Image (cartoon, rainbow, N blue to C red):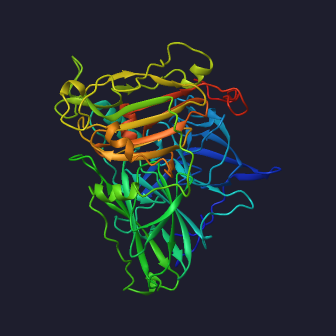
């Protein structure tokens, strides 16, 4: 990865990946092999087997240009089922390559393989890829960098160099064991033991400082930093000591540039920033720590660091007084700072926001508590007051099928796998962010989809609830980008809040942060046929059922119909 090293005062190790690129007339086809396998990884003084791609943690960075095609052969040599999701890639016509387990494919079983084939269409910036099966994405993830087509340029000053910073979480345990224990007990899973930047916890953790990531800079240069929140369950603040950041992109869409001293990313989100080395030559911490909005809920309260190192600063081995400068971080519950950041995003110019709305949808998103089933052991009901945690949208707790993927069931017209009666609004209206009656805390399990015809326009209000606890939810829609028109706190009121909609230059995103105890409004056009999961990107919540899916029917023109399934689609 250009611009990142372990240390300027140590040697470099070059890892060669199994990959190749074949040019075509107007674009390139990039071939990669991903071998998913258990690899001994030492973190926090302890060696444990982590599931990786090609023995790397994080996995390989894929670099392409807008219009290129990726062909990635995934071989599963691990002991768990696996799929790979290409987070934020539109997958126009190539829904079979999207990757969520039992949504667009059955998993790649141990010993099996599957080749993902898809083309990048009209996207530039930073995306990423990750496992979409249980909690494997804790260690199975990497950056997907999309540069402008040959002959095109960035809509901002050309950076001297580029660096990708992937924020993650690390457990001193097998993450699959962690989530299975929580599923068994009904309680919340154990929080992580560390946050990481490019797989390294950094100086503030035991046994970690010698591998702290170094980002080198020359005085006066302006560099592009691509930040990805790949953490499993935690929104994160990020700051660079004494430096301003100019946001120029997010989720592979360009943004009207704005300057900030702090970023807040929910899991799944990416943010591209320009940073100018305009401070005295020294070493400055790049620090990330939790934005934890759920009142009273436990969270990992540690801080991960990398180091922005001016090349003219003394080498730390030769100087005892060269300790990096630490930024002053926001409080863990600083919702005002998070909101000031998320509401600063605009598209670079006026955009065509859909104004004729075919589906005016209102989805509640939040947690719930199921009563302990009759006759169940108390050991399986260790949630609050002897309950089991759950979650839902519009009181439906989403249940994935286990014998056939949703897309296969749709394409093959197999009955009994799902229904298309997901409610367009909550079955019962209530004070969503107030003191909610206990009778509303238990959602109904189901595999309900919402059906759209090709080309229909959707406005969707995502309304957070205070059931169990109010919390910021990063909601990700597969296969689509959407315009974020507005966000606010309390209950959405159309007569009061519709006037706040930005219909001029709203940002285009694939993951929206629904504010704690609040709402977000998005719009999109159903121009991509297939079955597309929409879920909270806190993996603990998707496991509890905070998800649904849109079934988008075929259109009639080119790229308006789902392609036939590939012959190597994994068997169910």
| Side of 326 relative to 160 (left or right) | left
The image quadrant of residue 548 is top left
Q: Is residue 244 above or below residue 349?
A: below
Work out which residue is located at the far top of the displayed protein and give it.
415
Q: Nearer the viewer, residue 179 or 544?
A: 544
Looking at this rendering, what residue extends furthest in the left direction?
Answer: 385
Quarter of the image for the C terminus: give it: top right
Asked which quadrant contains residue 495, the reply is: top left
Identify the residue at the far right of this view. 25
Residue 348 x %, y % = 55, 58
**In the image shown, does 568 or 211 lie closer to the viewer?**
568
x 56%, y 78%: residue: 221
Question: Where does the image place residue 112, in percent across and percent down from the top left?
Answer: 62, 33
Write down the quadrant of residue 148 in the picture: bottom right
Q: Is residue 294 above or below residue 239?
A: above
Q: Nearer the viewer, residue 452 or 447?
A: 452
Label tally: 0
Q: Is residue 515 visible?
A: no
| In the image: residue 159, left or right of residue 428 | right
Against 65, residue 93 (above or below) is: above
Measured from the top left, where is residue 535 in percent x and y?
A: 43, 36
Residue beneath the point at 31% across and 70% down: 328
User: Where's residue 356, x and y in %?
Assistant: 52, 34
Q: In the rendered view of the protein, which quadrant contains the N terminus?
A: bottom right
Instruction: Answer yes or no: is residue 148 visible.
Output: yes
């Amino acid at each position: 990865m250009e611009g990142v090293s372990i240390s300027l005062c140590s040697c470099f190790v070059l890892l060669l990946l199994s990959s190749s690129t074949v040019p075509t007339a107007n674009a390139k086809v990039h071939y990669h092999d991903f071998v998913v396998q258990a690899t001994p990884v030492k973190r926090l003084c302890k060696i444990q087997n982590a599931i990786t791609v090609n023995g790397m943690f994080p996995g390989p960075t894929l670099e392409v240009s807008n219009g290129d095609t990726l062909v990635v052969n995934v071989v599963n040599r691990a002991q768990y089922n696996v799929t790979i999701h290409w987070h934020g890639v539109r997958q126009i016509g190539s829904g079979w390559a999207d990757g969520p387990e039992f949504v667009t494919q059955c998993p790649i079983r141990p010993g099996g393989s599957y080749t993902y084939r898809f083309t990048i269409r009209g996207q530039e910036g930073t995306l990423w890829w990750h496992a979409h099966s249980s909690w494997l994405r804790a260690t199975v993830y990497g950056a997907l960098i999309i540069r402008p087509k040959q002959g095109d340029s960035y809509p901002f000053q050309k950076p001297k160099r580029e660096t990708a910073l992937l924020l993650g979480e690390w457990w001193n345990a097998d993450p699959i064991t962690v989530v299975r224990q929580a599923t068994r007990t009904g309680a919340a899973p154990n929080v992580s033991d560390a946050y990481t930047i490019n797989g390294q916890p950094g100086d503030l953790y035991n046994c970690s400082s010698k591998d702290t990531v170094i980002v080198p800079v020359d005085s006066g240069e302006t560099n592009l930093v691509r930040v990805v929140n790949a953490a499993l369950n935690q929104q994160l603040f990020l700051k660079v000591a004494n430096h301003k950041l100019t946001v120029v992109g997010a989720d592979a869409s360009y943004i009207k540039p704005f300057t900030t001293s702090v970023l807040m990313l929910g899991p799944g989100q990416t943010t591209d920033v320009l940073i100018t080395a305009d401070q005295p030559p020294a070493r400055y911490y790049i620090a990330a720590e939790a934005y934890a909005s759920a009142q009273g809920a436990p969270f990992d309260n540690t801080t991960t660091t990398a180091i922005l190192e001016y090349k003219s600063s003394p080498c730390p081995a030769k100087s005892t007084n060269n300790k990096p400068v630490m930024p002053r971080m926001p409080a863990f519950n600083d919702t005002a700072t998070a909101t000031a950041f998320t509401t600063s995003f605009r598209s670079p110019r006026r955009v065509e926001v859909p104004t004729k709305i075919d589906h005016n949808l209102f989805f509640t998103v939040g947690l719930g508590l199921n009563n302990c089933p009759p006759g169940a052991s108390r050991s399986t009901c260790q949630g609050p007051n002897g309950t089991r945690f759950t979650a839902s949208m519009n009181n439906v707790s989403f249940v994935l099928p286990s014998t056939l993927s949703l897309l296969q069931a749709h394409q093959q017209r197999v009955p009994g796998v799902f229904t298309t009666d997901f409610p367009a609004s909550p079955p019962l209206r209530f004070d969503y962010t107030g003191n909610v009656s206990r009778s509303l805390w238990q959602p109904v399990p189901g595999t309900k989809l919402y059906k759209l015809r090709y080309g229909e326009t959707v406005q969707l209000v995502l309304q957070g609830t205070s059931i169990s606890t109010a919390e910021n939810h990063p909601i990700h829609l597969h296969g689509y980008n959407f315009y974020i028109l507005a966000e606010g706190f309390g209950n959405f009121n159309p007569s009061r809040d519709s006037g706040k909609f930005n219909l001029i230059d709203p940002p285009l995103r694939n993951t929206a942060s629904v504010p704690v105890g609040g709402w977000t409004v998005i719009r999109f056009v159903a121009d991509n046929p297939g079955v597309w999961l929409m879920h909270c990107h806190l993996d603990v919540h998707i496991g509890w059922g905070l998800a649904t899916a849109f079934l988008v029917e075929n259109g009639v023109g080119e790229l308006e119909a789902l392609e036939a399934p590939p012959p190597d689609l994994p068997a169910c």
